[in-house]
Image (cartoon, rainbow, N blue to C red):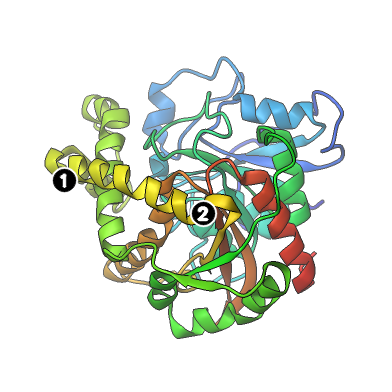
């Protein structure tokens, strides 16, 4: 396994490593962790020098990281994140923006940018990230790797910095569906009994219309393979209000939670932020509470809607991102347009507390794009099994 960091995935400074703490299914494998998970005796920077300066060195290691070490994996370092995990492109002016190994002229995606980059470059076998509004799914699609956002609450986030607690999840990246599943065997809770395989497949119309024609076309072979496994896809409307409405409800709720979680520190410390981050926190501080309340009311209606759609094992399939990653020279306005179009899609699993896997199935203009499979809350293991079967059918393993 190469350890040179030519893609600038790891945080600057001396590499933090940890030997395995036991033996198990991950014997001989290496991994990295996003620098918002605590490691005992090591500072957690959360992507910002002022955060690191004003917080004590971690006294304990996050349980999710311990579980991986106890299962036989070796930790090879901490990876870069967007400041306070509040961004989707992967930029960080303090630590440097990681390179997207499979599209070097494009952003890696955030906020788990370093973790996706390290896996895509083959620096580690797998990596740990976090996903609030798409921070595992989008980098997975952009960097051409596998990524999972588990059901909300399925994997412990103790010892990890928070952003939007009712959305935050602990996810991971790999270069194969088999390894994605193996890591899930270590981190995910058991499912009761012997649950039936997932199916039928639901094709969420709004998401396919939202994707560019080139992205939708790149999904065609994967959808044909999925039909061979689980039957022809059935068209459904998951968001008749429109994806922009989902994005707006998610945005307002996340902003209010972000300020409740981090606002006291921001107000007291007055940290230096890179472009866009300060503006997002200012918007969070000034969020109209009636808009956030409307978002929560919408979520109370939306969760049972998607639960009924996915009851009995149905699984949604749609493009993870509407386009490949934006290019590095994209203007702020172009980046914001991508953010809005993308987060209307990622909000489906976020608002529904669902599990979602992104599979690298194609390319557009030479850059990766992923297909997402989305299952009901608690069906994480069945979803990983379906992802493995689809990957085998596509020859990705």
Q: Nearer the viewer, residue 34 or 362?
A: 362
263 relative to 397, above or below? above
101 lies left or right of 346: right
- Going 66% across and 71% down the picture, which residue do you hit? 231
Q: Please provide percent x and percent y for residue 322.
A: 44, 72
- Going 52% across and 61% down the picture, which residue do you hit? 108
Which residue position holds label 2? 310
What's the CA distance linking mark 1 and mark 2?
A: 28 Å
86 relative to 395, above or below? above
Which residue position holds label 1? 291
Q: Please provide percent x and percent y for residue 344.
A: 35, 61
Q: For numbered disc 2, what is the local secondary structure?
A: helix
Quadrant of residue 343 within the rendered picture: bottom left
Q: Nearer the viewer, mark 1 or mark 2?
A: 2
Q: For numbered disc 1, what is the local secondary structure?
A: helix
Q: Which label is found at residue 276?
A: none
- Crowding at mark 1 (Cα within 10 Å: few <14, some 14-19, many 20+): some
């Amino acid at each position: 396994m190469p350890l040179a960091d030519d893609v600038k995935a790891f945080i600057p400074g001396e590499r933090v490593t940890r030997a395995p703490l036991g033996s198990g299914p991950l014997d001989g494998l290496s991994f990295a962790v996003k620098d918002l998970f605590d490691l005992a005796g090591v500072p957690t920077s959360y992507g910002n020098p002022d955060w690191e300066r004003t917080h004590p060195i971690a006294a304990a290691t996050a349980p999710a990281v311990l579980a991986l070490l106890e299962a036989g994996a070796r930790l090879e370092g901490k990876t870069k994140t967007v400041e306070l995990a509040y961004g989707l492109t992967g930029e960080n002016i303090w630590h440097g923006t990681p390179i997207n190994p499979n599209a070097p002229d494009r952003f890696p995606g955030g906020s788990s940018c370093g973790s996706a980059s390290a896996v895509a470059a083959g620096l580690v076998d797998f990596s740990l990230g976090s996903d609030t509004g798409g921070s595992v799914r989008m980098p997975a699609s952009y960097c051409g790797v596998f990524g999972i956002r588990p059901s909300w609450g399925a994997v412990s986030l103790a010892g990890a910095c928070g952003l939007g607690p009712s959305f935050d999840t602990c996810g991971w990246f790999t270069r194969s569906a088999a390894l994605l599943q193996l890591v899930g065997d270590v981190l995910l809770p058991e499912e009761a009994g012997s649950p039936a395989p997932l199916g039928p497949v639901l094709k969420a119309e709004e998401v396919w219309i939202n994707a560019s024609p080139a992205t939708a076309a790149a999904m065609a072979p994967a959808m044909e393979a999925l039909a061979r496994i689980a039957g022809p896809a059935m068209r459904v409307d998951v968001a008749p209000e429109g994806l922009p409405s989902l994005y707006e409800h998610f945005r307002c709720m996340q902003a209010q939670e972000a300020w409740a979680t981090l606002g006291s520190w921001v107000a007291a410390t007055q940290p230096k932020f890179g472009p866009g981050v300060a503006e997002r926190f200012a918007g969070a501080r000034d969020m109209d509470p009636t808009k956030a309340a409307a978002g929560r009311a919408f979520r109370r209606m939306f969760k049972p809607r998607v639960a009924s759609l996915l009851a009995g094992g149905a699984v949604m399939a749609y493009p993870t991102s509407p386009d490949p990653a934006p290019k590095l020279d994209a203007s702020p306005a172009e980046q914001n347009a991508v953010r809005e179009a993308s987060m209307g899609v990622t909000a489906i699993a976020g608002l529904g507390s669902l599990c979602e896997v992104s599979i690298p199935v194609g390319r557009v203009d030479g850059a990766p794009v992923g297909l997402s499979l989305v299952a009901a809350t608690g069906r994480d293991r069945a979803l990983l099994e379906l992802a493995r079967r689809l990957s085998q059918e596509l020859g990705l393993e």
